[in-house]
Image: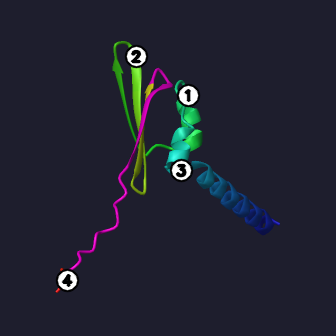
Amino acid sequence: MNIIKMVILRGLTIICASLLLISFASAEINKEHYDKIKDDMTMQQVISILGQPTQMAEFNMLDKKHVIATWKDDGNVIVVQFVNGKVDLRHMTNNKPTSPVTPTSPAT
């Protein structure tokens, strides 16, 4: 009986760990997801769209709490500034390398 309980417990642990990993997996960082981010959204709302940020910095200025969160994925970068917990500024850049240009030799 103890072996059966251990097998069931192990199976439940694996399922819970898998669900946890899926819930923390970051979304693809792309223009479609960026366009869903709106002013005054909370950080939790943005995280539900983009997943956990890859970098965060916090500071206080003029009695306001500022958080700058960055998401990076395959050359795309989204930076969102939160002021007192709400989206204030956002920006997206695409740093994907372009395909290399193959030099052509002059006609002879």
Q: Residues within 10 Å of mark 2 (few under 14, many from 20)?
A: few
Q: Are marks 4 and 1 in contact (CB under 8 Å)?
A: no
Q: Please state if 102 lies on the left or on the right of 91 as rendered.
A: left
- Give the structural element (helix, strand or loop) at label 3: loop
Residue type marked 1? Met
**Which numbered disc flags the more N-terminal residue, 2 or 4?**
2
The amino acid at mark 2 is: Lys
- Image quadrant where residue 108 sits: bottom left
Q: Look at the numbered disc 2 and give the secondary structure of its residue.
A: strand
Residue 63 higher or lower than 3, as above or below:
above
Q: Alpha carbon of mark 4 to alpha carbon of mark 1: how far? A: 58 Å
The disc label shown at residue 26, or none: 3
The residue labelled by disc 4 is 107
Instruction: Give the CA separation, mark 3 to mark 2.
Output: 28 Å
Q: Which residue lies furthest to the bottom in this view?
A: 108
User: Label 2 belongs to which residue?
Assistant: 64
Residue that mark 1 sits on:
41
Tag nearer the camera, 2 or 4: 4
Question: Sequence order check: which comes first, mark 2 or mark 1?
Answer: 1
Distance from disc 1 to disc 3, alpha carbons, whole Å, reads: 18 Å
Please report whichever mark, 1 or 3, sits nearer to the chain's N-terminal start: 3
